[in-house]
Image (spheres, rainbow, N blue to C red):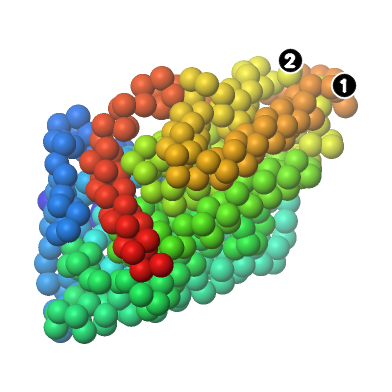
Amino acid sequence: MLLCWLLFIPFIGGLACWATSRGRDNAGLARVIAFLSMAAVFVPAVVVWFTGDFSLSGDPSIAPAWQYEIAADWISRFGIEFHLALDGLSLVMVMLASVLGMLSVVASASTVKSCVGVFHANLLWTLGGVIGIFLAIDLFLYFFFWELMLIPMYFLIALWGHEENDRSTNTAAAVKFFIYTQTSGLAMLAAILGLVFLHYDQSGVLTFDYNQLLTTDTSGAFGMVLMLGFFLAFAVKLPAVPFHGWLADTQANAPTSGAVDLSGILVKTAAYGLLRFALPLFPEASANFAPVAMTLGLISIYYGAVMAFAQNDIKRLISYSSISHMGFVLVGLYAGTMLALQGVVLQVLASAVSTAALFILAGQLYERMGTRDMRALGGLFGRLGALPGFSLVFVVASLGMPATGNFLGEFLILFGAFAAHPWFVVIAAGGMILAAVYALYMMHRVYWGNPDAGGTIATMRVREYTMMMALVLITLILGLFPNTVLHVTQTVTHDISSWFAAGVIAAAQTS
């Protein structure tokens, strides 16, 4: 019942928001419905957080252990079930989606003025698709939600994109997003079908069930091909260089709430997919592919940092910084140790929060100044109330300052990867220096220097201030009390590292 509640509430809330747009568009009611829908996901997730037994650990040779699980026949002829499950990893991701979902609703209050009910319907349906990804353990159902979330996100970008652009520019960005993700999704679909047929060939059972597919022998060249199908889909969504071409244009043209969802939630579905599916289902192939994946991670770290430094548009700078952050995630994932995987989880959460905060602040700055071009800004530190101070907090969080979750995530990744991959760690650590360069350079160009014009600018509203304080609190909790997350995910990361270690041994024996 809990899993159905978590999954269907956003879709039901979206229908209710859509209904408010019939006749006279009741914007206030639509916003209230959308906010309460995500709160109705967040509250039971918090209850599970505090009451769940996260010491449960599955047998890596059989199946993982789930806190909650529900299964019902769907298309039984082909072994497809409506199969949902929740463990520590999916719980923290559902909580992330619900928190950023509530903030997206609040952030859109001052920017979305037309068709408000339809906007929030698409926002909630996007979030519902994301939550479905975090809960589905039937691979057909997982792919269904993977594709489902793309459609409402397309409309959010195309119809409510950057207001300075004409409709065709926003639509072009939405089409680019859709083509990249749809094409890579087809590669994953082919890999899913290949895995299902491989399992059928070995066991005589036709199924899309994750628990059963974990027992499939995916060693050999065919297993590598299947793993690459999953990896391609996740690398595009992460995104990792050279599959990143859609991100900057899409986030620059998305509305603030859409950019928050893209950077904070949709992009993180790729890291979740690598953790949940690519590594456990294909341990030997993942171990063999690890040097290539970690090299792509290093390239992403440096490429994202250099490109961020070269930007004049604030949102494009934040987008490229996100690519750099996800490079660390890729390095940690394919290091495969429990410590590195715990760092990956922390880095995913912390970077989602800090990047979402920076996008919200960029939207607030644009609302007041009418531009995101840093060449037209400067000297704003004493003229915007608390906004520059909040910007400084999340800029230093983004560059990995101690006492923030970003620092601990990167530290655990590098520390956990050092024993097996010391040179990768040494090279990756240099990316943290570049992060400081582009982050502080942005602060200097926007808030310091000589002001272009005098006068008072509107300071932050109570609603905006409350949003930022909530995000600051989350950032500090992740940095100062990381065990609030790590104790929830420790058994999951232990199981994944066990699968990966078995793959390393198998790869060494066959090489």
| Residue at position x 69%, y 36% in the image | 434
Q: Is residue 126 visible?
A: no
| Residue at position x 41%, y 67% in the image | 511
> Secondary structure beneath disc 1?
loop
Q: Does 319 sit above or below residue 191?
A: above
494 vs 468, left or right, is left
Crowding at label 2, few (<14), some or many (≥20) Cα neighbours within 10 Å?
some
Crowding at label 1, few (<14), some or many (≥20) Cα neighbours within 10 Å?
few
| Residue at position x 18%, y 37% in the image | 54
Residue 435 location (% of width, % of height) = 66, 35
Callout 1–callout 2 Cβ contact below 8 Å: no
Front in this rendered view, residue 511 or 149: 511
Residue denoted by label 2: 382
Residue denoted by label 1: 450
> Secondary structure beneath disc 2?
loop
Q: Does 138 sit above or below residue 465?
A: below
Q: Can residue 229 be seen in this view?
A: yes
Residue 220 location (% of width, % of height) = 36, 75
197 vs 357, left or right, is left
